[in-house]
Amino acid sequence: MLANIVIDTFIKGGPIMWPLLICSIVALAVVGERFLWWSQQRPKKDMDRRRKVFEALKAGDLAVASSMARSSPDPAIRMIWEGLNYAHTADSLPGALQVAASDEVDRAERFLPVMDTVITLAPLLGLLGTVTGIMHSFNFVGSDELAATKVSGGIAEALIATAYGLGTAIFCLVPYNFYNRKVDRLQRELETVATNVEVLVEAYKFKKNEAKLTTVA
């Protein structure tokens, strides 16, 4: 019974309901995929290994730090590993860390532009359905004795399309903002870790140079 009502309402919404249906399916798929992806990221954070990597960097042992960071599922440690392995010199380390951090953020932002497009497109399609429904209604004004039924059908088409478009956008808006917030948080975390790595490496270089100057003196 409910299925029949839904199908009947969908048909009354007019042809614009089909692109709206595609938008809602895409939105549902993206929300589900992002939910699963972020759920898998939660247990990957390894604070104990981060501490050990920082200790190795503080001691100036980049090889040990790289070995500890290798094959870690933690995005911050993965960034450190890529930064250490793709930096040709200590001076190029900040750039290497930045590139690695961008790769991690890109993974976190995957499909969010699609959701953003749906949030913008769905209400516009609903508005288009409103216009075509009203145009359909005016075509039958004063035409015959069935004009009232046909006019009401056009108005129903307009309202259903508008409601579906707004509903799809609202459904996407909350998770879109939620996942954008998580991406921002991840980006700040990666920036903090990268800064700590740079500071530790520079501090070791400074101590090493200071020791050399002391020896020479």
Image (tube, helix red, strand yellow):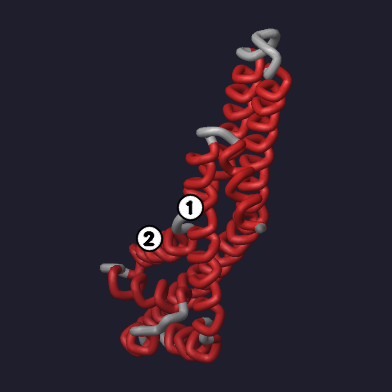
**Mark positioned earlier in the residue sequence (2 or 1):** 1
Q: State how far apart marks 2 and 1 are (Cα).
A: 30 Å
Asked if 138 appears above or below 65 in the picture, the reply is above
Q: Which amino acid is tagged 2?
A: Val
Query: Which numbered dot is residue 99?
Result: 2
Q: Nearer the viewer, residue 155 or 36?
A: 155
Image coordinates for residue 200, horizontal then vertical, percent: 48, 77
Residue 214 in sight here: no
Image coordinates for residue 207, horizontal then vertical, percent: 45, 80
Neighbourhood count class around disc 1 (C-alpha, 10 Å): few under 14, some 14–19, many 20 upward:
some
Image coordinates for residue 125, horizontal then vertical, percent: 56, 33
Image coordinates for residue 148, horizontal then vertical, percent: 73, 20
Q: Which amino acid is tagged 1?
A: Val
Question: What residue is shown at x 54% (from left), y 61% (from top)?
Answer: 31
Q: Nearer the viewer, mark 2 or mark 1?
A: 1
Question: What residue is shown at x 43% (from left), y 63% (from top)?
Answer: 107
**Tag 1 residue:** 26
In the picture, which quadrant includes the N terminus?
bottom right
Query: Which numbered dot is residue 110?
Result: none
Asked if 30 appears above or below 54 in the picture, the reply is above
Question: What residue is shown at x 56% (from left), y 33% (from top)?
Answer: 14
